[in-house]
Image (cartoon, rainbow, N blue to C red):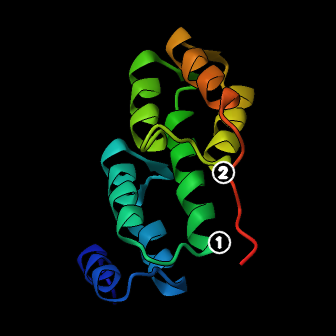
Amino acid sequence: MLNLRQVEHDVMANGRIDGHHLDVLRRELYVGGKIDRRAVNLLVELRKRLEHHTPDFEHFFYRAIKDHVLASGRIDAEQATWLRGILATGNWIKDDDRRLLHELKGEAQEVDPEFESLFAEAMKQPQDRHSSK
């Protein structure tokens, strides 16, 4: 049976996360149906190491962030700062990241002004440029 260390090793070796790795991540990172900051930060690091971002992993990644951030129903200043750090890499927020911010704003019961600031900045940025290659 795979564990987190084996998943990390495989990601380093293969540059991708496939179905059975996702099953391990779900089982190991969601404790009691919840995912904590340590677990989400592990996903952030794994994602940085991936050469190939599969749709299944991307869905899991954004779902985990959303589940973590919305656990209390509100987004405070600390969470907004953390989101800025993981989403605004290189002063650019991708379309999928903006979609996440929209969902967070729509589902949160309360948001801090720091989140509102992040949201406004993200929405001002142009959409991703997709090449036709």
Q: Which mark is residue 98?
A: none
Q: Amino acid at mark 2?
A: Asp
In percent of width and height, residue 122 lies at 62, 31
Image position of 75 with respect to 14: above or below: above
> Where the N terminus falls, by quadrant?
bottom left
**Callout count:** 2
In percent of width and height, residue 85 lies at 39, 36
Q: Nearer the viewer, residue 78 or 91?
A: 91
Q: Residue at x 53, y 58 (%)?
A: 61
Q: CA distance from mark 1 to mark 2?
A: 11 Å
Q: Residue at x 47, y 25 (%)?
A: 80
Mark with earlier residue (1, 2): 1
Image position of 114 with respect to 49: above or below: above
Q: Residue at x 51, y 35 (%)?
A: 69
SS at circle 2: helix
SS at circle 1: helix
Q: Nearer the viewer, residue 20 or 48?
A: 48
**In the rendered image, which residue does mark 2 sit on?**
96
* In this rendering, the label closer to the viewer, 1 or 2: 2
Q: Are marks 1 and 2 in contact (CB under 8 Å)?
A: no
Classify mark 1: residues with Cα within 10 Å, few (<14), some (14-19) or many (20+). Answer: few
Q: Residue at x 72, y 45 (%)?
A: 127
For residue 21, which quarter of the picture? bottom left
Q: Nearer the viewer, residue 26 or 120?
A: 120
In percent of width and height, residue 126 lies at 70, 39
Classify mark 2: residues with Cα within 10 Å, few (<14), some (14-19) or many (20+). Answer: some
**In the rendered image, which residue does mark 1 sit on?**
55
> Where the C terminus falls, by quadrant?
bottom right
For residue 90, which quarter of the picture? top left
In percent of width and height, residue 5 lies at 23, 76
Q: Amino acid at mark 1?
A: Pro
Image position of 14 with respect to 104: above or below: below
